C-alpha cells in the first residue's frame, strides 16, 4: 500500500469520526449534524504550515432512506483521492455509523493487486444527539488486516477519551457558530505507531466546524475548518 493512500486513509477516518452527518430514520433525530436533503458542505484540512492538505466535500443525498452522503476528498492539486457513499442510522438518542464498511471500500479501491485481501473490524462510531459539558462520549476503533503472498500488515486507528469540555462561539470561513468543544486522544498505527490529541468544535444542525490535531509534544499538526455550508 502506498504512503499516499495510507495518509488519505488517516484523513478519512478523522473526517468520519468527527463530522458525522445524519439523516432522519424512523425516529426523529436532531443533533450535531446536517439533516436536510440537498445540504452541501465542505471541510478543508491545513497542515502545520497552513497549506491546504485536503478538501472533503459532502452532499446529503437522502434524508429518509438512510443513504446520506457522497464524500469526496481532493488534495491541494485538485485530484480526487476519495469517493464513497455511506449510511447512518438513528434510534432517537444516538447516531450510529458503520465506519468499517466505508474504510474497507476505500482501501480496496486503492489496492491494485487482486490477490491482496483487506479485513476491517472494530467499533462503530456512536454520537449522542444531545451534548452537555462534562459528558463522556463512546470510543471508536478501526482494525485493519492487509494480507497478500508478499506481506501481512496490521493497522489500527483508535479515538479514545472523548469528552465535552466547554462551549464557545467561533468564526470560520463558513460563518459564525455556537459550538460544543470536544477533546480526545488518538492512537494510530499505519506505517508506524503514533499518538496525539484532538480538539473539536461542533455546532447543532451543522456538525464539525473546526478541529485541531496535536502531536504528542502538544504542537498543532493539522487544522480542519468548515469552509462552506448550505442547505
Image: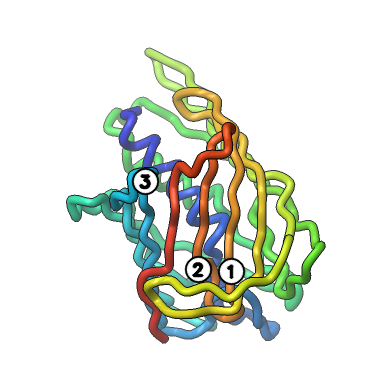
Using the image as rendered, state which of residue 165 and residue 109 is in the foreground: 165
Asked if the residues shown at circle 2 and circle 1 are in contact, with their CB atoms under 8 angstroms apart, the answer is: yes
Q: Which residue is mark 1?
A: 202
Give left or right: position of 80 versus 86.
Answer: left
Q: Is residue 225 above or below residue 92?
A: above
Quarter containing the N terminus: top left
Image spot of residue 205 (x, y percent): 57, 81
Disc on the earlier residue, 3 or 2: 3
Colour mode of the rendering: rainbow
Say if 113 sits above or below 168 in the image. Answer: above
Q: Are marks 3 and 2 in contact (CB under 8 Å)?
A: no
Q: Is residue 65 left or right of residue 181?
A: left
Q: Residues within 10 Å of mark 3 (few under 14, many from 20)?
A: some
Q: Is residue 127 visible?
A: yes
Q: Which residue is mark 2?
A: 209
- Which residue is tagged 3? 47
Q: Where is residue 70 drawn, in percent x and y? A: 38, 66
**Element under disc 2:** strand
Give how far apart the Cα atoms at labels 3 and 1 are. 20 Å
Amino acid at each position: 500500500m502506498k504512503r499516499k493512500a495510507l495518509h488519505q486513509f488517516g484523513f478519512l477516518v478523522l473526517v468520519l469520526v468527527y463530522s458525522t452527518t445524519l439523516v432522519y430514520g424512523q425516529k426523529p433525530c436532531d443533533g450535531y449534524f446536517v439533516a436536510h436533503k440537498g445540504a452541501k458542505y465542505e471541510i478543508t484540512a491545513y497542515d502545520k504550515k497552513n497549506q491546504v492538505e485536503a478538501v472533503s466535500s459532502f452532499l446529503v443525498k437522502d434524508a429518509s432512506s438512510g443513504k446520506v452522503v457522497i464524500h469526496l476528498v481532493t488534495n491541494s492539486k485538485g485530484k480526487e483521492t476519495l469517493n464513497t457513499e455511506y449510511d447512518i442510522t438513528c434510534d432517537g438518542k444516538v447516531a450510529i455509523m458503520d465506519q468499517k464498511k466505508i474504510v474497507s471500500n476505500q482501501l480496496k479501491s486503492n489496492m491494485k493487486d487482486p490477490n491482496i485481501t483487506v479485513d476491517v473490524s472494530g467499533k462503530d462510531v456512536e454520537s449522542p444527539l444531545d451534548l452537555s459539558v462534562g459528558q463522556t462520549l463512546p470510543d471508536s476503533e478501526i482494525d485493519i488486516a492487509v494480507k497478500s503472498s508478499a506481506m501481512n500488515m496490521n493497522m489500527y486507528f483508535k479515538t479514545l477519551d472523548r469528552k465535552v469540555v466547554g462551549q464557545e462561539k467561533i468564526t470560520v470561513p463558513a460563518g459564525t457558530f455556537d459550538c460544543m468543544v470536544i477533546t480526545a486522544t488518538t492512537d494510530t498505527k499505519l506505517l508506524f505507531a503514533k499518538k496525539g490529541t484532538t480538539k473539536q468544535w461542533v455546532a447543532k444542525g451543522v456538525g464539525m466546524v473546526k478541529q485541531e490535531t496535536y502531536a504528542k509534544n502538544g504542537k498543532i499538526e493539522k487544522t480542519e475548518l468548515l469552509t462552506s455550508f448550505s442547505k
